[in-house]
Amino acid sequence: MTFKFILFTLSLIASFLMPFLLEGSWSLLYWLDSIFLTGLLLLVIASVMLLIEGRFFMAFIQSTKSFFAKINKREQVILESEKRTSHPVEYAKNFPSRKAFFQIGLLFFGVSLFLSSAIYFF
């Protein structure tokens, strides 16, 4: 069993259970709403993974650390005495499952949008 299959089945089970938790009863429209919300959640998770993987937040973290290191006199003395730089080693984070989250989220999003439109217009 692959990660994509497991994620798909868990998301489908969550979309079946979500109408009971949110509305108290199950109907086709509530289920389509929950599929839409599940797909949207998976797309947001994939987007956050993309931002972390692309080191979007590293500039903010580095500038904050640099600012506080320049303000703190004790830290400056320690850095000068040990002759080390204030720039730490950056580590790259790779998410191998980002593509699976995006594909399944897009599938759920598209299916719910198509079925909701079909129910509304026909």
Image (spheres, helix red, strand yellow):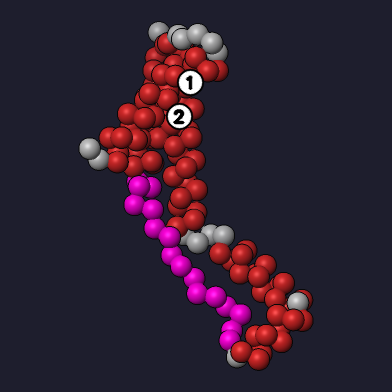
Q: Is residue 13 above or below residue 79?
A: above
Q: Is residue 20 above or below residue 93?
A: above
Q: Which residue is under mark 1?
A: 18
> Do the residues under discs 2 and 1 have CB atoms within 8 angstroms?
yes
Q: Position of residue 17 (x, y in %)?
A: 44, 19
Residue shown at 39% from the left, 14% from the top: 118
Give the class, few, some or many, for how many residues have Cα within 10 Å of label 1's Cα (few <14, many ≥20).
many
Q: Name the amino acid, label 1.
A: Met
Instruction: Reply yes or no: does residue 88 show up in magenta.
Output: yes
Residue shown at 39% from the left, 41% from the top: 102
The quadrant of the picture occupied by the N terminus is top left
Q: Position of residue 25 (x, y in %)?
A: 50, 8
Give the class, few, some or many, for how many residues have Cα within 10 Å of label 2's Cα (few <14, many ≥20).
many
Residue numbers of the magenta segment? 84-99
Q: Earlier in the sequence, mark 2 or mark 1?
A: 1
Residue 120 is left or right of residue 77, and the answer is left
Residue shown at 31% from the left, 35% from the top: 6
Calculate the distance from the C-alpha at mark 2 to the C-alpha at mark 1. 9 Å
Residue 59 is left or right of residue 35, and the answer is right
Q: Which residue is under mark 2?
A: 38
> In the depicted view, which residue is nearer to us: 115 or 61?
61
Q: Name the amino acid, label 2.
A: Thr
Mark 2 secondary-structure assignment: helix
